[in-house]
Image (spheres, helix red, strand yellow):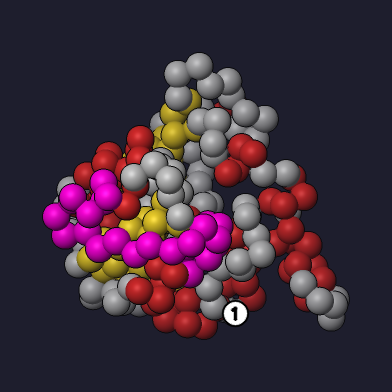
């Protein structure tokens, strides 16, 4: 199966090199790495262009969901793996998750656990409970998501109206569409927590919007 890695970035130059290194250093190498520059002003696109094997797509700033959807449109893989610019993959991430999907062809996508790291001087945010401050915390975000291309064809892309919680919204819709999934209970991501995390800055209402949409649809209302 051909593997595409998509990295959306908006002013993420301080993390981008390490993220790209972790994608290029996989024990199961991806067939392509697509960096979608969402109107960055810090030279992120130029930095990515200097890395061998990386394809850069530039767009006017439109938000993370639109950047993810642009990456989907550009990707050529049978498998789509998402890497957030401020996160780092364990070297075996693709090998483990893609391997599970090869063993279980009914799976539309897989997730994995994470190791959470606070950047220096960053207090623990309210959304991050103390039990998650260990080396094997759950993760339901796109940084953990490895999916088959047909899952996006069935479910659709990310909701461009959402500036946070777009990953949860997609997974809710995937469940409604009958797309099977599995979780690898291993920390295959190092996830940084810093002042610019979308999860940190998003309101609770924004993050729960996907669940409200599910309830509305099941009641026959609009999402």
Q: Which quadrant of the figure contains the C terminus?
A: bottom right
Disc 1 crowd, CA 10 A, few/some/many (<14, 14-19, 20+)? few
Q: Number of marks in the image?
A: 1
Toward the viewer: 154 or 159?
Answer: 159
Q: Residue furthest left?
A: 52
Residue 189 image-quadrant placement: top left
Tell me which segment is drawn in magenta. 46-69
Please indicate whether residue 41 sits to the left or right of residue 206 in the image.
left
Q: Residue 52, how many percent across, how many down? A: 14, 55
Residue at coordinates 22% horizontally, 59% vertically from top-left?
A: 54
Residue at coordinates 51% horizontally, 44% vertically from top-left?
A: 138
Q: Which quadrant of the figure contains the N terminus?
A: bottom left
Per the image, the residue denoted by label 1 is: 177
Toward the viewer: 153 or 219?
Answer: 153
Q: Residue 161, how many percent across, how many down? A: 66, 64
Whether the magenta-drawn stretch holds residue 51 is answered as yes
Q: Residue 20, how many percent across, how many down? A: 26, 48
Residue at coordinates 64% horizontally, 39% vertically from top-left?
A: 201
Please indicate whether residue 200 sits to the left or right of residue 204 in the image.
left
């Amino acid at each position: 199966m051909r593997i595409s890695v998509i990295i959306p970035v908006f002013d993420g130059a301080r993390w981008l090199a390490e993220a790209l290194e972790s994608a290029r250093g996989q024990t199961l190498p991806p067939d392509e790495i697509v960096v979608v520059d969402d109107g960055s002003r810090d030279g992120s696109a130029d930095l990515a262009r200097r890395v061998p094997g990386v394809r850069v797509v530039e767009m006017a700033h439109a938000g993370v969901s639109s950047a993810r959807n642009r990456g989907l449109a550009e990707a050529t893989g049978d498998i789509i793996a998402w890497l957030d610019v401020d996160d780092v993959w364990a070297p075996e991430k693709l090998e483990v998750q893609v391997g599970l999907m090869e063993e279980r062809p009914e799976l539309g996508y897989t997730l994995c656990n994470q190791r959470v790291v606070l950047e220096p001087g960053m207090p623990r945010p309210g959304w991050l409970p103390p039990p998650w401050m260990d080396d094997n915390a759950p993760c339901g975000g796109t940084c953990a998501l490895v999916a088959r291309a047909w899952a996006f064809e069935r479910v659709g892309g990310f909701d461009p109206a959402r500036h946070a919680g777009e990953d949860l919204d997609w997974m809710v819709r995937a469940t409604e569409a009958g797309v099977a999934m599995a979780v690898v209970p291993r920390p295959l991501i190092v996830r940084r927590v810093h002042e610019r995390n979308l999860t940190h800055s998003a309101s609770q209402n924004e993050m729960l919007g996907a669940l409200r949409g599910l309830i509305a649809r099941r009641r026959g209302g609009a999402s």
